[in-house]
Image (spheres, rainbow, N blue to C red):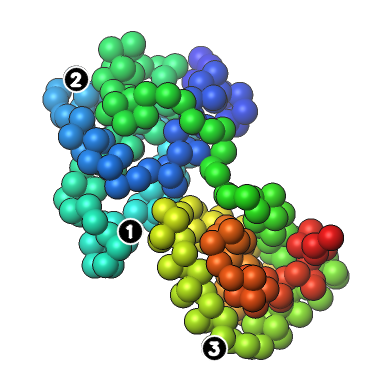
Amino acid sequence: MARRTLQHLEEHPNISEILGVLAHLAHIGDEDLRVLAEAWTNNGMLAAARDRALSPESPLVLEVLAAFEAVADLFSEDLAGEAAYVTVDPTVTATALKAVRDAIAAAYAKPILTKPEFAAMMAPWLAAFPVARVAEPDLGPSGARVKALLAALPRLAARCHDVEGRALFDALVELSYVDESDRAGARDSAFHAAVMTSRRRVWALVERSGAEGISRPCYDCSVPSDPNEVSRVLGVVSDAACALLVADAVPDELLALLTRPVRDLIPEQRSG
């Protein structure tokens, strides 16, 4: 059957709806959380539909579980409820995220769900977002530069087979020690700008994407990586990518400080 042979998202018959849900995760606002929580319900039919959607026979179920992990990361601060900028009660957020997970699971499992099951699982999501949104997350006016920087990370991860990638990685390690305290303060200011412009969850998405990009292991060799060096490089690159995310909301000198290490080393980041 098709659901057992489906190997890639590109082959999924419901790919547009899947991408629509995934793309909007980082843009869920506080009022959206309240709507999602209020709309979420549970009953025997929904419980059975969830079991079916998360069964081993469901299309790309491992991707669904990975998306659930991403949701937990994006809303970790909201669930903790400790930051001053978190305004939604964590219990409301926890309920809202049940609706979000239902929407993700339903979008992937649509080929094996009945129409009533699919409609019931998607209902809270559609209550909050009745109109389909963008096909990919909005990374702001400098989104192309953010994506170009994140795209460089797999090359750094493959540095054991790439001489230039190795040199780039080593250079970034050295630069991570330059202006370290100044960059820490600038990072805090940039994150404040992300909070003020409602981009803090997109910030978390960028950080997660960066960590995934540089952490892909090489299975062809056994050269160990220094966790501290990897962490320092990831920090430098994440700082730059997140600064670009809020480039329109921070002073030019702050943006220059956080992007300087990568601007001189990664061609895609050079201006002009």
> Type of residue at label 3?
Ser
Residue in front for this viewpoint, 96 or 140: 140
**Nearest to N terminus: mark 1 or mark 3:** 1
Pointer 3 residue: 181
Task: Please give the name of the residue rendered at 71% of the width and 85% of the height, measured from the top-left corner.
Answer: 174
How far apart, in angstroms, are the residues tagged by discs 1 and 3? 26 Å
The image quarter containing residue 64 is top left
Q: Nearer the viewer, mark 3 or mark 2?
A: 3
> Type of residue at label 2?
Met
How far apart, in angstroms, are the residues tagged by discs 1 and 2? 29 Å
> Type of residue at label 1?
Ser
Task: Please give the name of the residue rendered at 26% of the width and 67% of the height, measured from the top-left corner.
Answer: 84
Secondary structure type for disc 2: helix
Q: Are marks 1 and 2 in contact (CB under 8 Å)?
A: no
Q: Where is residue 126 in the image (x, y as percent from the top left)?
A: 33, 25
Q: In this view, does 26 lie above or below 261?
A: above
Direction left: furthest residue:
43
Q: Which of marks 1 and 3 is in front?
A: 3
If the image is split into quadrants, where does the C terminus sit?
bottom right
Secondary structure type for disc 1: helix
Pointer 1 residue: 76
Q: Say if residue 192 shows up in the picture.
A: yes
Residue density around tag 2, few if under 14, some if 14–19, many if 20 or more, within 10 Å = few
Q: Are marks 3 and 2 in contact (CB under 8 Å)?
A: no
Q: Is residue 14 left or right of residue 44?
A: right
Image disc number at residue 45:
2
Q: Nearer the viewer, mark 1 or mark 2?
A: 1
Q: Say if residue 50 shows up in the picture.
A: no
Residue density around tag 3, few if under 14, some if 14–19, many if 20 or more, within 10 Å = few
Residue density around tag 1, few if under 14, some if 14–19, many if 20 or more, within 10 Å = some
Q: Where is residue 14 in the image (x, y as percent from the top left)?
A: 51, 21
Task: Please give the name of the residue rendered at 42% of the width and 53% of the height, measured from the top-left corner.
Answer: 198
